[in-house]
Amino acid sequence: MPTVLGASFDLFRANEMTTIFGNPGSTELPMLADFPSDFRYVLGLQEAVVVGMADGYAQASGRTTVANLHTAPGVGNAMGAIFNAQANHSPLLITAGQQVRAQMTLQANLTNRDAIRMPHPLVKWAYEPARAEDVPLALAHGLHLASMPPRGPVFVSLPMDDWGVEVDDGDAREVIARRVSGRAVADPDSIRALAERLADASNPVLVAGPDIDAAAGWEAAIGLAERQRLPVWATPAPGGGRIGFPENHPNYRGVLPPAIGPVAQTLEGHDLILVVGSSVFPYYPHIPGPLLPDGAELVAITSDPDEAARAPMGDAIVADVGLSLAALLEAVPESSRPAPEENEGPQELPASDPLNSSTVHSALAEVFPEDGIIVLESPASTLALRNQLRLSRPGSYYFSSGGGLGFGLAASIGVQLAQPDRPVVCVLGEGSAQYAITAFWSAVAHDAPVTFLVLNNAEYAILKWFADVEGVTGAPGLDLPELNVAAVAAGYGVSSRRASGRDEVRDALATALASSRPELVEVPVEPGMSLF
Ligand SMILES: Cc1ncc(C[n+]2csc(CCOP(=O)(O)OP(=O)(O)O)c2C)c(N)n1
């Protein structure tokens, strides 16, 4: 008869989940016993890094990914990263070890007392199996649920003495053989009605959200924009964890501002706003105003019933974003509206010393490979990067929709491991890098040749901007003098250097991109926000 351990690893194998991210403790060691040679264990040195790496891996591979944490304190360390994974719609099977069953009631050391409640608001499902024999079924339940829309993290607590228990062979085979598919097509009537609304509108517009990328909907989104002559905005940056439309396309207009009043102002003149694969809308900060421009209607297509239900305005269709876009493209006629005005390219930038972040991004754009991937956590230069790089291939951009720092550095390693043939550039603020700093070690240990670009402005620039918006003066804690990320990364084994002039930065990035090892380039930049 197979054991819980054998059946569980067969289940992972059958679902192509052979890369496991973790940080082990005594309660997790029994799960790792005789670790099979066809599996890969990616060690993170702190649990937020473990979940951040798994998040990047899950998104870039499209597959549910296991992150194994150390009982209660490990889950506690990972909470911010689990929050991000939920916002990113990232399918994670998070497991944590637990005391042996015989010592849980007396609450021996390391007992996760309320294992299910601890991650509760951040996961789709949290469970501790009633019997050891139920572990494979509980893991199957979790992994299928994580992979169904809206994708997201689930949690299973695993008592450490369960792994050696025998399970019924037939039962295990049934569980392992199951496949569950969750891509549902929209009701054809609602697609037909939407196609008519689009065709009848005088000036419709498309807002492209992150789930277009996750649902492989780029081609259909481009087809729809071209056939219906739609100008296209990207969803506001805070919720735009991925890019759903090519940013060098003539119909592309830019990134929507992230606040209520400015969104309505930006979309002024449009009578129908079609939002695809995004919440309506990821607003922040609060700048009040009308939700929509005068006379405008809104329709959203989302795979997330909660996004559909909580939107403060407009209609919504809940269905797979990629399949629905394809169905809508079939249903709309070629429009006779004039094509949207052509978008201007990136702006010319004046020279400065130290460099402006926009100038650094323009230097990056010069050497950035066609198939490159950006993982971004440089808050004050998010818009500058989008504007300068104009990313235009699917799966080229990952950003934390949750806004919890620590995602970028960790996720870039997961993305690189999932996409070993594509060059990954991780762009970080020197402040953001601190939240997942030990991930540099994982990049080296697991041969992830990420190019790290650190923009060091010696401050929390975006918080100074927020202070202005919020009318806050005299706040402490917004300056970061003397941080030397290159030196810290070198301590973890990453080849690191500092560069200052534009040509020097460009050449250093080109060298790092050509390297088969992780490399870091840190650039001193002007303080403040960079928008272009
Ligand atoms: C876990 C977490 N803690 C705190 C914050 C608040 N926060 C948002 S941006 C920011 C500053 C980041 O500094 P840096 O990377 O240097 O970015 P800059 O604004 O200078 O571009 C902070 C602390 C956050 N988003 N997440």
Image: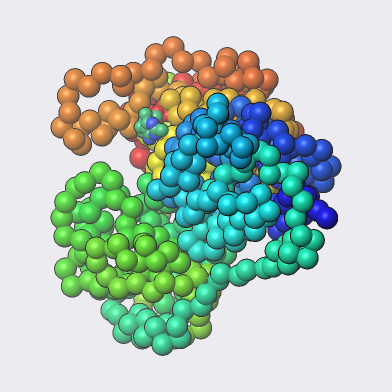
Q: Position of residue 271 (x, y in %)?
A: 25, 73
| Residue drawn at the location 68% of the way across and 44% of the way down | 162
For the question of whether residue 194 can be seen, the reply is yes
Looking at the picture, the colour scheme in use is rainbow
**Residue 69, quarter of picture:** top right
| Residue drawn at the location 48% of the way across and 24% of the way down | 434
Q: Position of residue 380 (x, y in %)?
A: 37, 34
Foreground residue among 121 and 457: 121
Q: Position of residue 83 (x, y in %)?
A: 44, 43
Foreground residue among 352 and 237: 237
| Residue drawn at the location 51% of the way across and 58% of the way down | 151
Query: Compared with residue 503, is residue 57 higher up or lower down, i.e. above or below?
Result: below
Lateral position of residue 302 relative to residue 45, left or right: left
**Residue 214, quarter of picture:** bottom right
Q: Position of residue 106 (x, y in %)?
A: 52, 32
Residue sitting at the far top: 482
> Which quarter shows the C terminus?
top left
> Which quarter shows the N terminus?
bottom right
Query: Compared with residue 85, is residue 79 higher up or lower down, i.e. above or below?
Result: above
Lateral position of residue 41 relative to residue 297, left or right: right
Quadrant location of ligand 1? top left
For the question of whether residue 426 can be seen, the reply is no
Lateral position of residue 98 relative to residue 260, left or right: right
Number of numbered labels in the structure image: 0
Foreground residue among 221 and 38: 38
| Residue drawn at the location 66% of the way across and 49% of the way down | 132
